[in-house]
Amino acid sequence: MSRPRLLQLFLVANALFSMLSGIVLIVMPDRIATLLGLPSFGFFAPIGIGLIGWALVVGWQAMVQRKLSLAVLLISFGDFAWVIGSAILLIGWGDALSSTGSVVISSIAILVGLFGAGQLLGIREYHREVDPTLETSWRHQVSVVVDASPSVLWSTIQDLKSIASYSPGLASSTVDRPVQPGAVRTCHDTSGRMWQEECTSITSSDRELTMRFRSERDDWPFPVSKMVGGWNVDAVGDGSCVTVWWSLDPQPSWAGIILVPLLAASQDRAIKGVISRMAGESTKARSIRRKQRARLVAWC
């Protein structure tokens, strides 16, 4: 995925503007009321406090290295809600506003709307990755570092039918043949949905696995026209780094800017749990083998 320069730019601008606006509303509420042509009812300071809180949330998203695209999507929706609220104010109470007040409220609404739109474009830049080979246009991946041997962890991952043992969201998973290109894994989740994944490549020496989701089936349950996913395990110090990725085409295509952040939020949490449980099982098995070897040596 590309570095989210555009996303960070709009988040920073949004946070700075919200912080400045909040401070102004708290420090000089009476002047703002006069400028807008409104009586000072004492609600400008609470709005200012809310804007400062908003600025902190947006600023945190701007600063973290790994952007939470669902959080950014919700921030954009919040910006658009401000625009709608401003429009309602101008339409419903425009006569009560001064001409300067109408211009100020309209200008701020336009600026906030630009922040929201720019952040959506940033989400698109973050997840958009056209892959001519896979014929997909959106991508998401998550990497998890765990304290487990790469070889032991890989043996668990390549056992395709075992995935349900580590994923609470899956009711069952079966494989129609020994693990090799062409093997098909059938998964049922706890909500009753079923889908199939076909192994297209597996390389034990590199610890890499690629699966094609059979989205062409009539019973395919997800709003995606094409999806490919993969796992790979790399050694990191005494442990492992497991990367899981998805490359897909949402259906309809315009919905990617919403569907992919939703996928990212759900799968980031789920996959981290799956890999942690796999690592825990691998570590437990390794500890048992060590104890067995120790007993064997002691017996000898």
Image (spheres, rainbow, N blue to C red):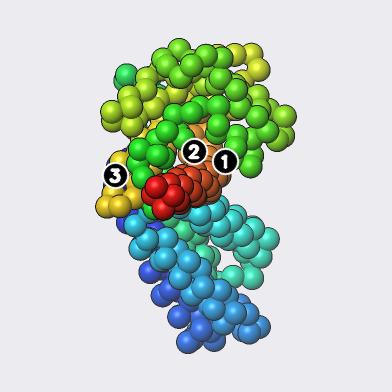
Q: CA distance from mark 2 to mark 1?
A: 24 Å
The amino acid type, in three-letter code, at marker 3 is Ala
Crowding at mark 1 (Cα within 10 Å: few <14, some 14-19, many 20+): some
- Mark 1 lies on a secondary structure that is helix
Label 3 vs label 2, nearer the camera = 3
The amino acid type, in three-letter code, at marker 1 is Tyr
Label 2 vs label 1, nearer the camera = 1
Farthest residue in the front direction? 300
Which residue bears the numbered disc 1? 166
Which residue bears the numbered disc 3? 235
- Earlier in the chain: of badge 1 and badge 3, it is 1
Q: Are marks 3 and 2 in contact (CB under 8 Å)?
A: no
- Mark 2 lies on a secondary structure that is helix
Q: Position of residue 48 (x, y in %)?
A: 53, 77
Q: CA distance from mark 1 to mark 3?
A: 21 Å
Q: Residue at x 51, y 84 (%)?
A: 26
Q: Nearer the viewer, residue 110 or 175?
A: 175
Which residue bears the numbered disc 2? 260
> In the figure, 96 relative to 235: above or below?
below
